[in-house]
Image (cartoon, rainbow, N blue to C red):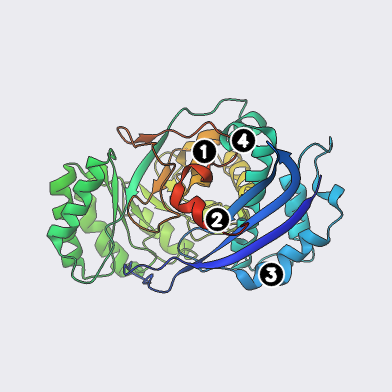
Amino acid sequence: MRIVDIREKTVPLASNIQNAYINFSKMTASVVAIITDVKREGRPVVGFGFNSNGRYGASGLLRDRFIPRLQEAAPESLLNERGDNFDPHRVWDVLMMDEKPGGHGERSVAVGVLDMALWDVVAKIENKPLYQVLADTYHGGTADPSVFVYAAGGYYQPGKDVSALQKEMKHYLDLGYRHVKMKIGGASLAEDLRRIDAVLDVVGDGQALAVDANGRLDFPTALSYAQRLEPYGLLWFEEPGDPLDFRLQAMLGEYYPHAMATGENLFSHQDARNLIRYGGLRPDKDYLQFDCALSYGVVEYLRTLEMLSAHGWSARRCIPHGGHQLSLHLAAGLGLGGNESYPGIFQPFGGFADGYDVEDGYVRLPETPGIGFEHKAALYKLLRDLIM
């Protein structure tokens, strides 16, 4: 059993939207295919992976460091003890060979892309959907039959007025979502409050709306927002300040009584641990949004969950960023609190399997082996081009 080939490509993920910090007009993503010599129905087992939105493709790192390490490794060093499947933890160790600790920047994206593809391979070889593999291995065999999802949108966009924002949010409700998220911090506080009021006219309840400042605000501005947001009783106030400014997060928590959320821009279990130690987050109230596809993959995410448990946090407080199928499998298989969803943007990567509609805020997963990219036609067409 061995890896025959690994192919990668950078693809555009461009859109004319922006949040408080960046626009996405030149965004890219890396896609990979890991081809093995294992056969199913006469064809090689192939695993696919890609990186989540918000970080650019990592082709240089993949080509120059991480793919060669896998290709040069002794085949048996990548297998489990029985020798009947690949071991993602051993593969991860090979990928990180000779990498210094710290500096969890873009290399975490490159490793996460390959980790995703490897877990797709492992589940296909086991002939199970990935969520069941995860549940069997790490969660006592119990997987959630469906996963809570919310619709993330409400971006700033040229020519997008309040009525267009309301129309967008109504569309999400019509799709079956019961909770939505919108961007703030990219306009004045007064303008953002007008936008929030307009969305609340559509969704009807503050608990149905989360807001996301994407790390834009300094402490005085974040405090001004918090004071004006408090009466709304929102689902959460997300990433008010720089993701590594744990002091800002902790100070704001002393003033803002409702739920906050952060973590999508922390890319290691060590950084996640520092957030828990020093960020003042409340395990009975706040939410954590670590994205496995950006943070070294599932292997590292398992370490993060272990750390959280040791600090008194339930996995149900984790609702990953990214809106992709891998996080959906983690949510179902590891008992997370839900998953982000991008119904209309970041295509073809955003969203879930075709034909699996959101029902009353929850979505089911296919029962076919692997992550299920083959059930998302537009995405599978792009991935399949790697091996044609």
Q: Quadrant of the N terminus?
A: top right
Mark drawn on residue 315: 1
Q: Residue at x 63, y 64 (%)?
A: 8
Q: Is residue 189 above or below residue 125?
A: below
Callout 4 touching callout 1 (CB < 8 Å): no
Image spot of residue 202 (x, y percent): 15, 46
Of the image marks 2 and 4, the number of the one nearer the N terminus: 4
Mark drawn on residue 134: 4
> Mark 2 sits on what residue?
383
Residue 185 sits in which quadrant? bottom left
Of the image marks 2 and 3, the number of the one nearer the N terminus: 3
Image spot of residue 221 (x, y percent): 29, 68
Q: Is residue 67 left or right of residue 265?
A: right
Give the CA distance from mark 4 to mark 3. Answer: 29 Å
Q: Residues within 10 Å of mark 2 (few under 14, many from 20)?
A: many
Q: Is residue 234 above or below residue 145?
A: below
Of the image marks 4 and 1, the number of the one nearer the N terminus: 4
Q: Amino acid at mark 1?
A: Ala
Q: Residue at x 56, y 35 (%)?
A: 131
Of the image marks 4 and 3, the number of the one nearer the N terminus: 3
Q: Amino acid at mark 2?
A: Leu
> Mark 3 sits on what residue?
63
Callout 3 touching callout 1 (CB < 8 Å): no
